[in-house]
Amino acid sequence: MSKPVTIRVDDELHALLKQRAEDEGTTVTALIARAARDAVRDPRLEGAAEVFRSFIDRHAAEFDAAFPEDSPGQLDAPGRAA
């Protein structure tokens, strides 16, 4: 179930939101809902993607050695699911 929330934005921001929504193939409502979810996201998740990428970069060789069929280069090979 969803609840309606009314906000007021100036004409310039509304135009920017409409353009962004159009560019992304979505709606202004969806953009604002995503921003609201991001606003209440657990702060411990901030930077988590970068930490993960860094970990993978540092340990890619070990991963490839342990799971050779699942190494990124193999995933794009013909007959393999990407």
Image (cartoon, rainbow, N blue to C red):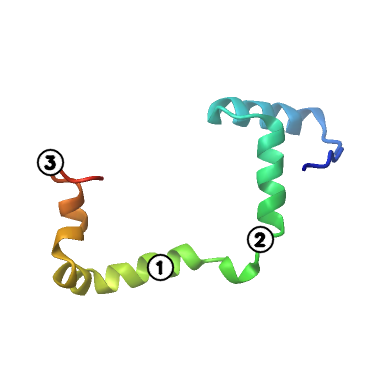
Q: Amino acid at mark 3?
A: Pro
Give the answer, above or below, for where 1 lies relative to 12.
Answer: below
Give the answer, above or below, for where 43 lies relative to 26.
Answer: below
Q: What's the distance in space between the residues labelled 3 and 1, CA to CA?
A: 28 Å
Q: What's the distance in space between the residues labelled 1 and 2, CA to CA?
A: 18 Å
Q: Amino acid at mark 2?
A: Arg
**Horizontal side of residue 64 vs 31, given as left or right:** left
Identify the mark at residue 43; answer none if there is no mark: none
User: Viewer-nearest of labels 3 and 1?
Assistant: 3
Instruction: Identify residue for label 2.
Output: 41
Query: Which residue occupies 20% across, 50% down?
Result: 75
Query: Which residue occupies 23% across, 45% down?
Result: 81
- Whether the residues at callouts 3 and 2 have beta carbons within 8 Å, the answer is no
**Residue 6 percent location from the top left of the image:** 87, 38
Q: Earlier in the sequence, mark 1 or mark 2?
A: 2
**Horizontal side of residue 70 vs 34, given as left or right:** left
Identify the mark at residue 52; answer none if there is no mark: 1
**Residue 79 percent location from the top left of the image:** 14, 42
Q: Earlier in the sequence, mark 3 or mark 2?
A: 2
Picture quadrant where residue 2 is located = top right
**Horizontal side of residue 26 vs 29, given as left or right:** left
**Horizontal side of residue 82 vs 26, given as left or right:** left
